[in-house]
Amino acid sequence: MHVAIIMDGNGRWATQRGLPRTAGHRAGAQAVDRTVEAAARQGVDVLTLYAFSQANWQRPRGEVRALFGLFRRYLKEQTSRCLEQSIRLNIIGRRDRLDPRLISLIEAAEQATAHCTRMILRIAIDYSAQWSLMQVCRSFGLLVSTDHERFARQLAVVDNSLPVSQVDLLIRTGGEQRMSDFLLWECAYAELHFVSRAWPDFGEEDFQSALAEFSRRDRRYGRIEPTEPVRAQHA
Ligand code: FPP
């Protein structure tokens, strides 16, 4: 079971309370801790969180700096917690535009948790699904493969990602209903679940009710009977 989350609504949550947007991101970081614990408890295999998109570089410099401060703190403080809970950390997205000190923290966290098996926690930073897909096409040159498996393997390389299954359930908080350039390939057959609650207010009960609704969905992958995902088939 792979769950991905677009953690939206931090800024509005803060503004509604007369607080700076960065306070919303700090509260959002606490919701991350709660949700990671809830996902591990619920037996999720892979949890992917959208923390910073390529488009987010366009935000005011102070907000970007505050967000990267939170990412650094998260890696420093939560790596040991992940180890305790056997959660394997993986930061996906581009690394060529990240501060070298952050890259060192990422590499240390990934190495320290490499043996953990309970759940993979992927955090997307400087991520753009469109950019990743274009890199894969570029790396294949003119001979773009139609082999799904090969394409997916190369996508993981481009994304600095561990090999993981496709997304089963995509949750988006904050009331908007869009993909925002997140995991476009991996969400091909994802069930979508939209929550009006802002991310800082998202709790274990919300996560559980998303999983409960998912379990009631009828996944047919284009067939008539509910079944497993279909690989490319040719008549
Ligand atoms: C979207 O809300 C949220 C983000 C761009 C940042 C997500 C970051 C966190 C949840 C905090 C830290 C994360 C980790 C992994 C430690 P928004 O700012 O777009 O909200 P708005 O739509 O209300 O403006």
Image (cartoon, grey):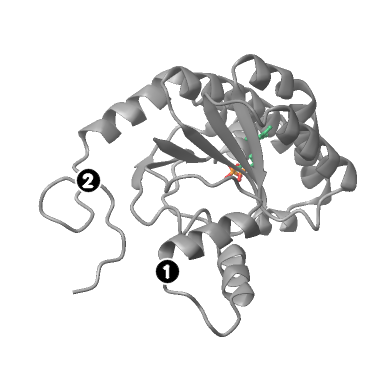
Q: What amino acid is found at the position of numbered circle 2 in the picture? A: Arg
Where on the picture, by quarter, is residue 218?
A: top left
Q: Which residue does the image show at 77% across and 38% down from the upper left?
A: 106
Camera-near label (1 vs 2) is: 1
According to the picture, the residue beneath numbered tag 2 turns out to be 219
**Whole-percent x, y for residue 13 in the image:** 58, 33
Residue 227 lies left or right of residue 185; in this view the side is left
- Seen from this angle, which residue lies furthest left? 224
If you read the primary sequence from the N terminus, does the residue marked by circle 1 or circle 2 appear first? 1
Viewer-proximal residue among 22 and 209? 209
**Which image quarter is the C terminus in?**
bottom left
**Whole-percent x, y for residue 193 in the image:** 36, 41
Image vertical order of residue 144 relative to residue 35, above or below: below
According to the picture, the residue beneath numbered tag 1 turns out to be 147
Q: Which residue does the image show at 36% across and 48% down from the upper left?
A: 190
User: In this orientation, does residue 17 appear?
Assistant: no
Circle 2: element type: loop
Image vertical order of residue 81 relative to residue 155, above or below: above
**Whole-percent x, y for residue 159 in the image:** 63, 55
Q: What amino acid is found at the position of numbered circle 1 in the picture? A: Asp
The answer for how far apart the CA atoms under marks 1 and 2 are is: 23 Å
